[in-house]
Amino acid sequence: MIKKLFRQNQEVSPTSMDGKNGGGTIQLNKIVKTFSTEAGDVTVLKGIDADFRPGEFVAVIGKSGSGKSTLINMIAGIDRPTSGEVNIGGVAVHNLTEGQLALWRGRNLGVVFQFFQLLPMLSLLENIMLPMDFCNMYTPRERKERAMQLLAQMDLEEHANKLPTAISGGQQQRVAIARALANDPPIVVADEPTGNLDSRTAETIFSMFEEFIKNGKTIIMVTHDSSLAKRASRTLLIADGEIVNEYIAKALPLLNHQQMLTATHKINPVIYQPGATIVQEGIPGKKFYIVTKGQVEIALKRPGGSDVVVARYGPGQYFGEVELMFGGGHNAATVKAAADMLVEAVTLDLDTFTELMRESPDTRTALAEIVDTRMAENIQTRRGK
């Protein structure tokens, strides 16, 4: 694997790949990946569309076999898509030859593996110098100096001349991270980098990634640790080779992954102009709304006819559940797009919402509690309290 990552074809050296141009937006367009097995073809990724912005820390989560590792292998060029496009910082990565890909990757992207993948016969210092050697980065003297600086960053400078087997697993992972940073790449992808570490060491590794983000790097990390994933700037959930809508996952977190994927297939995007009325108090409610961009205002009518804004909801927050929980009753409040901004949302129809509540009693119970709270607050507001 390591040789594949850094193998270089000296006959190709496109100028578009000489600099650090991989720090732009990462765009995956309609990515399909099918593997041939003795039992037949298996499609692991099913039309993935995803963007990753410079400076983001994205945690990729999902059950075993959902396609997480294959997804980041597409970004790293370790696997190639069966169909679809991988564009990173203006480079069509899926079209590069093996030689071009190795050169581009070595200069623009660092890879951290779950099982470290350090070469056992090389010292820690030599392992870190390896990417610089293959990509002909820095002078020989600068390579050694840089490798020592990276080891010092990892508090491992005194172990520079040891073989990987002479240090602990947590220390080996820090060396693997140092190697991934050897050529100062703008993007780092990590596949379960804390999966084989104790919680204390995992926290140390994760804190390092958070520091990298502060220094402008983009981190895309596959993890099974939900507590760590919550600390990333964004979470990407994969189920059965497809990406679950992030707002469905945020609004209805008690659904299982398959139910979230079902909801993702059923949502309809809608757009409202500033100030537009989305639902009107007293009119039957037929949809569940999740805000994805902008803000909406929730208004109640008090005795005497005056409206009062009681709340503003932003991305990931929802409304319409009060009416749907009662089988499509009349809207209990008026909801408008904020006067100063466009609002985007996704909706679920009554039948889909009802079916999800039937399949997920935990979600129904949680929403029922929220409905009770909101109804009680509405009553107090109408009374002028």
Image (cartoon, rainbow, N blue to C red):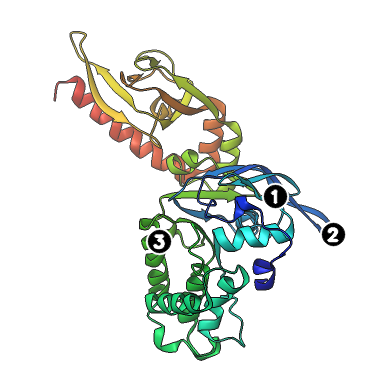
Residue at position x 29%, y 29% in the image: 312
Disc 1 versus disc 2: nearer the observer: 1
Q: Amino acid at mark 3?
A: Phe
> For the residues marked 2 and 3, what is the alpha-carbon distance in whole angstroms?
42 Å
Q: Name the residue beneath numbered marker 1.
A: 94
Residue at position x 50%, y 83% in the image: 125
Judge the density around disc 1: few (<14), some (14-19), many (≥20) Cα neighbours within 10 Å: many
How many numbered marks are there?
A: 3
Q: Quadrant of residue 297?
A: top left
Quadrant where the N terminus is found in the figure: bottom right
Judge the density around disc 2: few (<14), some (14-19), many (≥20) Cα neighbours within 10 Å: few
Q: Secondary structure at mark 3?
A: helix
Closer to the camera in the image, 178 or 342: 178
Find the residue positioned furthest to the left.
385
Position of 294 relative to 7 (above/below): above
Q: Quadrant of residue 229?
A: bottom left
Residue at position x 20%, y 20% in the image: 382
Q: Name the residue beneath numbered marker 3.
A: 212
> For the residues marked 3 and 1, what is the alpha-carbon distance in whole angstroms?
27 Å
Give x and y (percent) for residue 175. Answer: 49, 77
Give x and y (percent) for residue 192. Answer: 54, 66
Q: Which is more N-terminal, label 2 or label 1?
A: 2
Q: Secondary structure at mark 2?
A: loop
Q: Indicate which disc residue 103 carries.
A: none
Q: Amino acid at mark 1?
A: His
CB under 8 Å between discs 2 and 3: no
Q: Quadrant of residue 85?
A: top right
User: Does 274 sit left or right of 29 as displayed?
Assistant: left
Q: Indicate which disc residue 39 carries.
A: 2
